Image (cartoon, coloured by chain):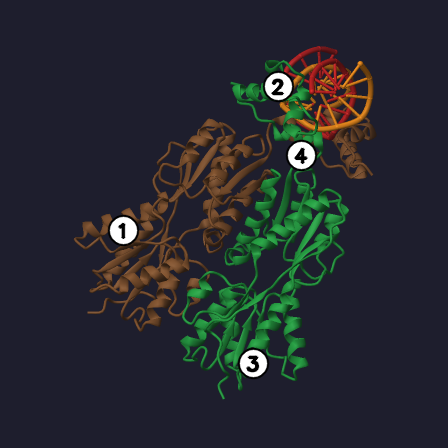
Chain colours: A green, B brown, C orange, D red
Amino acid sequence: MPRATIDDVAARAGVSKGTVSLVYSGKRTISEETRERVLRAAADLDWVPSSRARALATRRSSTIGLVLARDPDVIATDTFFAGFLAGVEAVLSTVDMGVLMQVVPDHDRERDAYRSLARGRVDGVLLLDLEIDDARLDIVRSLSLPAVIVGAHPNPAGLPQAHVDDGRGMVALLDHLIELGHSRIAHVSGPVGYVHARHRLDTFRSSLRERGLDPSLVVEGDFTAQSGRSATAELLAAETPPTAITFANDVMAMAGLSYAQSIGVAVPDDLSVTGFDDSELAAHLTPSLTTVHTDVVAWGRRAAESLLGHIAGDDVADAVLDGPHLVNRNSTGPAAS
Amino acid sequence: MPRATIDDVAARAGVSKGTVSLVYSGKRTISEETRERVLRAAADLDWVPSSRARALATRRSSTIGLVLARDPDVIATDTFFAGFLAGVEAVLSTVDMGVLMQVVPDHDRERDAYRSLARGRVDGVLLLDLEIDDARLDIVRSLSLPAVIVGAHPNPAGLPQAHVDDGRGMVALLDHLIELGHSRIAHVSGPVGYVHARHRLDTFRSSLRERGLDPSLVVEGDFTAQSGRSATAELLAAETPPTAITFANDVMAMAGLSYAQSIGVAVPDDLSVTGFDDSELAAHLTPSLTTVHTDVVAWGRRAAESLLGHIAGDDVADAVLDGPHLVNRNSTGPAAS
DNA sequence: CTGAAAGCGCTTACAG
DNA sequence: CTGAAAGCGCTTACAG
């Protein structure tokens, strides 16, 4: 059977289709009696309003976009994403909106993806993994696509942003290590083209410098276990290796920790190790991983709220979230003397 | 400025809007000259066709749906998902389609999610994590929503399916362990309400039984590191503990392996451990994890192709993918005698 | 090869 | 409190 339309419902309820529409949108008071007749007719005909027709009439698609230009392997090890998305959905579902996701292999396809979204598929987008001089800022501007940046750093772009200051996490980690007596501390960063990775690295350097410590023990990783392992190998092969390594995510830290153990470097006795993310696994390795925790679900919620406000035309202020907070576990200990 | 519409383009090119439409859809031969005029007019006006209007006119939304009813923590540790999605997108992007994702906290919201999708937001859905007597089978049927099951098991439902036989992975693992001389082999399963977890477990039991080995060493986990750890603790506390444990995913295996080491059980000397998934981290722990690998990107591709065929009304056959294949690493070794 | 027009199924001023 | 009608911006038979 062909699906019922608003006309069928209106006819059966003996009202105009405008009235049927109003019953559902609640934009006008409808007499209780009419309301009930309409609802019954809709139920009888098993009718639900078509979101396609509604989208055209309202010029709203009730969808937001999320484009990921990352290697699936990196996304897979990313503990941030799923929780973040759950937070986003929690907000969107209250207003019956959805999120359109796209995973693209490179920046060319990324550009195409935004173009396609801007044809009216979405009402706005969330920008993740901002890069230095990110081309997407121009893209969304030229497409007049409402956008909110999901940042882990101070706002660089003049767009609304929902952010957590990763620098605070880095400082918390360094405070912790310095308190334990460490003075040769290294950092394995993420790709420094990312604003967040760069920000963690910059904070690492400036914090150490402020305290008169050597800020030069840095190796760039790419968030994969593979890179965590090789960066650790490089650092430990030095003449005077660090007594502590801070990694820019948990996965690299777990791989690095494991590598250290495999060559007979005891953690935390000979080497302290810290992660960044607080992934579920991190708590259950031996030793468990000292890291930094952020409420990513709340982050997703705030980002979604900002974007909805921005779409509605509100003047949205940057949302600043709490954290990241230190999670002190067993991979860090007093510096070997 | 208000965005240009097809009427503006038609006027500027001096043709009817039907012709403009046909230039883009390629459904009719258009003279090269007209074509160029239209394209230039569109470029001048910075026009792109509205997908909202197209969706209404064609009764197609060019979107497929994906609903995840899982704890974000579990999704986060799921190495399957990102690669799978990348495969799906690779196929969809060639036909300019997208995927609408929804993460819901429970089965009630899941039902709502499908209902909302069925209002014309998507043309079809992919069903992940099928459960025994899964309510979604009835839901999609009653909503006339084209659906394809992403399965790790023989087809239980009469819907088209793209599947990998996880049972083969389990058999490969057991063959490997038995060859190494193990005879007390345990399994830490996923939630047995899931068809795939149940299928791995059933295969585990029947395979051991066939070879005259004890199939009763089973603990149910939930795919989290926490559960891997506690299940391992339970198994190792037995009077005659197993000499090998097969875990239903890598995360539980990594946590279990780590726990064993922490109580002085050497891996693989005292205990062999296997995972399931081949996550990136698994290769970089010490010891590296013996596990089973599936090409999840290809899986995503095949699932998307099946769904597109199904939406188009084709009679799609089940897609059976290769694997899972054994990845023999260092967490397995000869049984201690 | 091209045009005129109906139609997709809603929403929303405008009138009463 | 409700109705009639225009409009959202495309696609697609139908005609020529």
Residue A179 shows which numbered tag? 3
User: Which residue occupies the foreground of this view, B322 or B151?
Assistant: B151
Number of the front mark, 2 or 4: 2
**Amino acid on which the number 3 mark rests in the picture:** Glu
Which SS class for mark 1? helix
Which SS class for mark 2? helix
Q: Are marks 4 and 3 in contact (CB under 8 Å)?
A: no
According to the picture, the residue beneath numbered tag 2 turns out to be A33
Number of the front mark, 2 or 1: 2
Which SS class for mark 3? helix
Q: Position of residue A6 (x, y in %)?
A: 62, 21
Question: How many angstroms separate mark 2 from mark 4 (CA)?
Answer: 38 Å
Question: Residue placed at 52% from the left, 37% from the top?
Answer: B113
The number of numbered badges drawn on the structure is 4
According to the picture, the residue beneath numbered tag 4 turns out to be B51
According to the picture, the residue beneath numbered tag 1 turns out to be B204
